[in-house]
Image: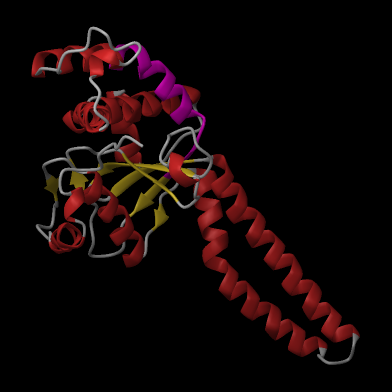
Amino acid sequence: MLPAYREVVEQRRLSDRPEQRAALALLMAFQFLRTKAHRDRWQALEEETVKMVEGAGGRMQDVQGWEGWEPSTENTLKREHLTSIQGSFGEFAQIIGAKDFVLAEPAPGRSFYLGDNPVSLANSRDFGPYGNLGIALPGIEVYMPLAADLMLCAWCPSILAEISERHHRGKRDRRAEALGQVVAGRLSPAEMKRLLEQFESLEQPHEEFLAATAEGRPVSSSSDNIDYYNGLQTTWAYRYVISRDGDFSLAQRANRENPSLRRGRRLRAA
């Protein structure tokens, strides 16, 4: 994993070699599973389950399959966590490796945060009460900073496909509309030429984005993009956030506005 990591950071480019993709998927899967935050989320789920069962007047030992249940200790949690990593590491890496890998670089004068729970998830799709942050769900976005100025993104393949389809459909429709205006006599050929040049100027950032993702080059991030990425690092962090520039204003604001996320995202029993 380390040689692949160093290669990407030094060359600032993703290759199309399957061994590099496999190594990066393994690295991201391990960083996702290894953290104390990941271990404590399962403890939080157990606590919520106990609270729900006892709140209904029952006992955990009366629940089918939990007859021998006892409260988890730190040692049992660590042991179960290690066993869980061993059992799920390969599956998580395989799921991550099937995604589209994209590199992102920060806007000028900005840098990426790094939290102690560095693999963060996001999803703009709504799956109702079941949640939308499973790594195998459609639309999932997985992020892991590789350096203060480089981010590895693992996106559901539907994301880039939708971006590309919208771009090319819009490009085709705009040109067809311009040609129709010329045929109808409402636009001169010279005016159409100027209009197409305007279209090309507006479309250039999207063309560059799609070319960069296809070639493995970093895509440029706007200031809003950086706030989004750093906001995810903050809300997924368990205890610490690191900033190369020493600017924690976004993290401080996120903690004020979302006090429930100060110890990261916690699982809840339904």
Q: Is residue 270 left or right of residue 114?
A: right
Residue 62 in which image quadrant: top left
Span highlighted in magenta in the image: 85-102
The image quadrant where one finds the N terminus is top left
User: Could you say where residue 3 lies in the image, as x and y percent from the top left?
Assistant: 30, 25
Q: Main secondary structure of the magenta part?
A: helix
Q: Is residue 79 left or right of residue 268?
A: left
Colour scheme: secondary structure
Above or below, comparing residue 150 to residue 225 in the picture = above
Count of numbered tags? 0
User: In the image, what residue occupies the spot 13% across and 52% down?
Assistant: 244
Residue 230 in which image quadrant: bottom left
User: Could you say where residue 226 lies in the image, as x and y percent from the top left?
Assistant: 30, 59
User: Could you say where residue 229 lies in the image, as x and y percent from the top left?
Assistant: 31, 53
For the residue pair 109 and 237, the one nearer the viewer reads as 237
User: Could you say where residue 160 lies in the image, as x and y percent from the top left?
Assistant: 56, 48
For the residue pair 257 and 225, the one nearer the viewer reads as 257
For the residue pair 228 and 104, the one nearer the viewer reads as 228
Above or below, comparing residue 204 to residue 75 in the picture = below
Q: Is 91 in the magenta? A: yes
Above or below, comparing residue 128 to residue 200 in the picture = above
Q: Is 147 in the magenta? A: no
User: In the image, what residue occupies the spot 55% across and 53% down?
Assistant: 210
User: In the image, what residue occupies the spot 16% across and 13% down?
Assistant: 70
Question: In the current view of this chain or complex, which residue is farthest to the top?
Answer: 68
User: In the image, what residue occupies the spot 36% across and 37% down?
Assistant: 270
For the residue pair 168 and 7, the one nearer the viewer reads as 168
